[in-house]
Amino acid sequence: MALLEIRNMTHWFGGLRAVYNFNTRIEPGEIRGLIGPNGAGKTTVFNLVTGFYTPTEGQIFFLGREITGLRPHQIGRLGISRTFQNLRLWTHLTALDNVKIAYYSQIRYGLIGAFFNTRARREEEERIDHEARQLMRMLDIDQYAHRVVSGLPYGIQRKVEIARALATKPKLLLLDEPTAGMGPAEMEETMAFIRRIRDQFNLTIWLIEHKMKFVMGLCGWIQVLNFGEIIAEGPPEEIQRNPEVIRAYLGEMVEL
Amino acid sequence: MALRKALTPLLHWFRTRFGHVPVGAWLLGAAVAAFLERLLGPDLAYLLGLGSVPAIFGLSIILKTPSLIPSVLVFVVLMYVIPTLVVAWLSRALFLWWEEQLSVPVYVFLHVLFLFLVLYFWSQVDPYRLLVLRLLGINILLTLSLNLVNGWMGEFSVSVAGFMSVGAYVSSVFMVWGFVHDDVFGPPVFPEFLAPFAFPLALILAGAVTAVTALLVAVPSFRTRGDYLAIITLAYVFIVKSTVENLDFIGGPRGFMNQPEVASFTVVFIWTVLGIWVMWNYVTSILGKATNAVRDNESAAEMMTVDTRKVKIVAFLTHAFWSGVAGGLYAHVLGYINPSSFDLRKSAEILGMLYLGGLNSVSGSIVGPVLFMFLTEILRPFQLAKWLVIPVILIYAMIRRPRGLMGFQELRIPFLTRRQQAKEEARAYGVTGN
């Protein structure tokens, strides 16, 4: 059974067709790539999968269950998490609090526990605190635990965002341009990092990326989106040679 | 500048001598001072030619009749400064010993107890102080609960006066119907001696009814963000006011009185502490911190499994509940309410306290009302002109500290900070345990 299956997904923003007849199957353990020129609709696909938009047509299945039309926090609970293209951390909070809040759906004490500081709440918060720190240690960001995130370096903020996404215990992690604003050295590091978390946390990863070298080195299967439609898909070597893809990308380059 | 220069050696002396006297010892010192004032204050005031005990450290007397400044100074030094310093200094070892021996909750409780004693003795001297302190407790509840919505959640609500009104009327009707012989509600339903015991029930009922009416506001306005909540809550204040004015059985615009005297200082103090404790617990829990997540980035909160709609409604209803409770206390402290005591000016006053104290801060919500009421009370001799002076002070405070005095930070209490550091070190090295 595929982890994620999307059937004939189409989305209109008013009169603008953002995504047209999108189909895919993602198998467990994969690192899948979604590429395409600016404005091709990649982020819209992610927003549709995570419930920020409801597709105009089509269905989305996660672990065999239809998730079309669910709200993001419900989809998050089922095991899909994501990072955002422009970091969306909770800027007034510390890195540790950013990670801890993502345990929200795993909290079992109720409002009574929160208001009256019951033993159940104290034990549970202690456990989550411990787990969150451990998670941060695994990503080498535990030394920033008590720093307010808005003051952290950009690269660390990215990692905090990934730690936060991992705290929801996802099976599928969507990364929206994980290397935005990075140099070549950091890019290599990020590739290794993504492989590592895939293995460590038993993840399936679906990522959007602009940098060809990055996607080619990391993904086993790549889909290319242009004007909301898939124009090609296949393993990296094939995609690199595909004339349609070259036209979509080079067409852009020539104008420069 | 000259003043600061003159004070520096004094401050230095004070810091080296009294720098590490624990908070608890200060509270004990103040309690002793307040107790002494209760015993000897009136006589001393008479001897010094002050007439009666200066209500708020003699500050308003100074403004009214400057010739009494020496007497006031002597009174303050003899009555407050010396006893407090002596007792704090002598008892410091005891508190340091307690800090090691007692668990944190017990030690904190001890502080609250001493604070209660300070305020209790201090309030017994003068009915005016008693009234001001009870209103202060109520204002703290209102400010803190409003802070949940305006600070932690980052929305803008002005409905606090409306919530107070609902709470005040609901609790008043319940208490008058149950325990007072009244023209409208007839003879008391229950024996009158039960009134103090039923009062907590009346307050909880008041809070609950307020929360239910708040739900009507919350459900439509939380589907979107922005100015909607401000506008809807504004409407709420007016709707409540005109509803009450048109209900004849609770007096309409004439107001409603005969509330039994059940809101003593002790009762108000207990409810204030309870409210602070409950709201503090909430905002320090992960469920409560999710409110911050909604404020800082709602869509990220949604994706990280936070049920944002629920979080928003909980924060708003908690605000409504505690404002309703505070309204109930208010009605019974004053023993008379009318619809226009809960108009937009009341909301504006609470908003002033909130923004003076600072958003997103429990200690700010205590500091704000304390300072605001202190100002309004000591400036009383200026009469109407105080409403020219106070806004200027507020504007100055806003220029110097745009986030409010305590915005986005908490007051650090030394012994709690020490405990927390020890715990933090244990956690950072991966040692778990309690």
Image (cartoon, helix red, strand yellow):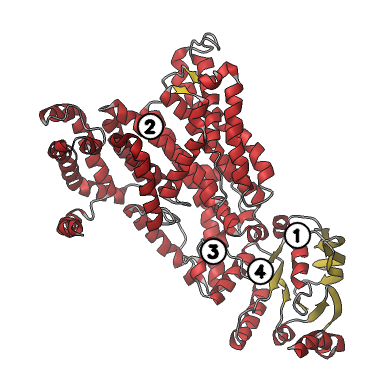
**Disc 1 versus disc 2: distance between alpha carbons?**
50 Å
- Report, in whole angstroms, how far the alpha carbon at label 1 lies from the one at label 3: 23 Å
Amino acid type, callout 4: Phe
Instruction: Please say if the residues under marks 1 and 3 sit with CB atoms less than 8 Å apart.
Output: no
Does dot 1 land on a helix, a strand or a loop?
loop
Q: Residue at x 63, y 66 (%)?
A: A166
Question: What numbered label is drawn on residue A51?
Answer: 1
Residue at horizontal 60%, vertical 68%?
A161
Q: Position of residue B133 (x, y in %)?
A: 35, 33
Q: Chain of mark 3?
A: A
Front residue of A61/B14: it is B14
Quarter of the image for residue B366 reads top left
Q: In the picture provided, is B18 more to the left or to the right than B115?
A: left
Describe residue B4's horizontal placement relative to residue A17 as left or right. left
Image coordinates of residue B7 in percent, x first then y, are 17, 56
Vertical placement of B152 versus A161: above or below? above
**Element type at mark 2:** helix
Horizontal side, residue A88 vs residue B380: left or right: right
Spatial separation of the CA atoms under disc 4 and disc 2: 49 Å
User: Three-letter amino acid code at disc 3?
Assistant: Thr
In the rendered image, which quarter contains the N terminus of chain B? bottom left
Vertical order, A152 against B128 (above or below) = below
Q: Secondary structure at mark 3?
A: loop
Read off the residue under disc 3: A91
Q: How packed is label 4: few (under 14 Cα within 10 Å), some, or many (20 or more)?
A: some
Of marks 1 and 2, the one in the foreground: 2
| Cα gap from disc 3 to disc 4, whole angstroms | 14 Å
On the same chain, marks 4 and 1? The answer is yes
Of A141 and B195, nearer the camera is B195
Residue placed under numbered mark 2 in the picture? B134
